[in-house]
Structure formats: C-alpha cells, structure tokens
Image: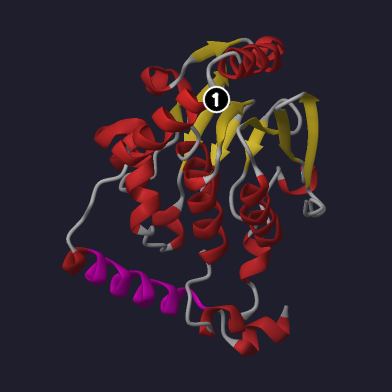
Amino acid sequence: MPTPPEGLREHELEPGVLSWVLDTPARRNAIHPSMFEWITARCIDLRGEVVILRGAGDRVFTSGFDLTALADPKLFQQPHPPDEALIRATTAIHTADATFVAALNGAVVGAGVELISVCDFRLACHGASLRLPAGKLGVVYHAAGLTRIHAAFGPTITRRLLLAGEKVEITDVRASLCALVQLDQLDAEARALAQRIRAQSARSVAGNRKLLRALDLTALPPDVLNAHAQTRREAYRHLAPSPAASRDE
C-alpha cells in the first residue's frame, strides 16, 4: 500500500470504509500532482471498499490543482499535457473496485469539480459551491473530464461553469446530490451512506457500479476527440511560462 504524500491523509473509519482527506490548509486544500499520483496507485489495491473523500476544515473542499506545480516550463515540454496526473487519477477512480463518496464541506474549485464528478455519490453541506476557472486561466478541458462533469451536473450547469466561469451554488445542483445537510451532519451522513453500501451484496454493488459508470461516459467520434486534443495542446503552449520568467521568480 503506497504511503500518502504530504497533504493527503487516509484512515480506516471501520472495516471496509476509508477516509481520504485533502489537507493542505495553507493552499486551501489544493491538490499537488503527487497527491493525484498517490490516488492512481492506491486505487489499484482497492477491493470493494467505500472511500469517503473530504476536504480538511469547514470552508473549502479544495481550491483545485496546485498551480505552483505549473511554474516549471519543462512541464509543458513533455509529450503529455500538464494535467496528466489529474487525468490518470480520475481514470483510476473510474475503474477502481471501490465505491467513492464525495463529502463536500465547502467550495469546490477547478480540478476538484472533476474529482467529485467521477465519484459515485456526492453529499454536501449548505453553503458549498462549484467553480471552474478554466476560461480565466486559458485552459481547454480534457474530453473525459468534461464528459464526467456533464454527466454529473447536466448541460446547463456545465456551460455555466466552463463557458461563463460562474460560481454555482450547491443548491443549484441539488438533483446531483444524495444529501444536502448542515456541516456538522456531513461526516455522519457520509458514513451512514457508506454503511448502507457495505450492507449490500458486494458482487451486486460491483456489477451494477461498473455498468452505471459506463453509462456516464459518452463515446465521442475519433475526429472530434483528435481535434479537441489539438486545441488543448495549442492552449497549453500559450500558457507555458518562459524559462526567463521562471528564473526571475
């Protein structure tokens, strides 16, 4: 079992129920690529558990991808895009033999929106919100992630997030949640849901979960995907910091 990196904590709440906590308070629970890499590796070892994903504290689930990791211009010279660690992690969650519950204790920003979209269940506290600053940053979102956000929250919310850059209050996505509760009830509600899942037949949960996840993905034509990938590459070339600028910082 890989050891969690700094900023991410795992503990077992009870047999078969795990808690993963994003805990980088100085950066509002931002997610460093090393944390995404740990998620990718850890998912391989899961065998039917329920994983509750939460942000530390009582204000922010996550501020998204840790942008300090993008300061190195060499990152943009790699054959894969700078958000490859996020893509691998969400793909690993999607294929893992585990059921994921996102417990939203506050604002969910950027990559966090995709992270909760790939989870099987979402619970939230009153006052939580969603925001995707891709447009402000100049990022063209990857196809699988956009598909998951679209499946989780629907076409109108996805357009508000990605095209208008709006902050979406959690009450606007109530239909995408299995519970909306007070903050002091969030952990108990998530754990009770985990216990209900664990009380089902493991074979039934695994079989139904696999098909339900497949239903969330839309098969897009290869020409559409290839064109989108090219647009992403061009966008990231414009975002790459210059070596001189990096040395001056």
Give the left or right position of residue 32, taking residue 9 as reference. left
Which residues lie in the magenta part? 225-240
For disc 1, the marked residue is 202
What predominant SS class does the magenta segment belong to? Answer: helix
What is the quadrant of residue 171 in the picture? Answer: top left
**Residue drawn at (55%, 25%), measured in percent from left and top?**
202
The image shows residue 191 at horizontal and vertical percentages of 67, 16
Q: Residue at x 39, y 55 (%)?
A: 135
Vertical placement of residue 247 versus 11, above or below: below
Would you place residue 48 above or below residue 68 in this image? above
* Residue type, numbered disc 1: Ala
Q: Nearer the viewer, residue 205 or 175?
A: 205
Q: Residue at the spot x=61%, y=69% of the render?
A: 70
Image quadrant where residue 139 sits? bottom left
For image coordinates 53% across by 59% down, the residue present is 88
Question: Mark 1 Cα within 10 Å, few/some/many (few <14, many 20+)?
Answer: some
- Counting from the top left corner in percent of width and height, residue 242 is at 57, 85
The residue closer to the viewer here, 102 or 132, is 102
Question: Is residue 199 covered in magenta?
Answer: no
In the rendered image, residue 220, in percent from the top left (x then y), is placed at 21, 55
* Left or right: where 7 falls relative to 145: right
Where in the figure is residue 216, as x and y percent of width and height? Answer: 32, 38
Task: Tell me how many marks there are.
Answer: 1
Residue 40 relative to residue 76: left or right: right
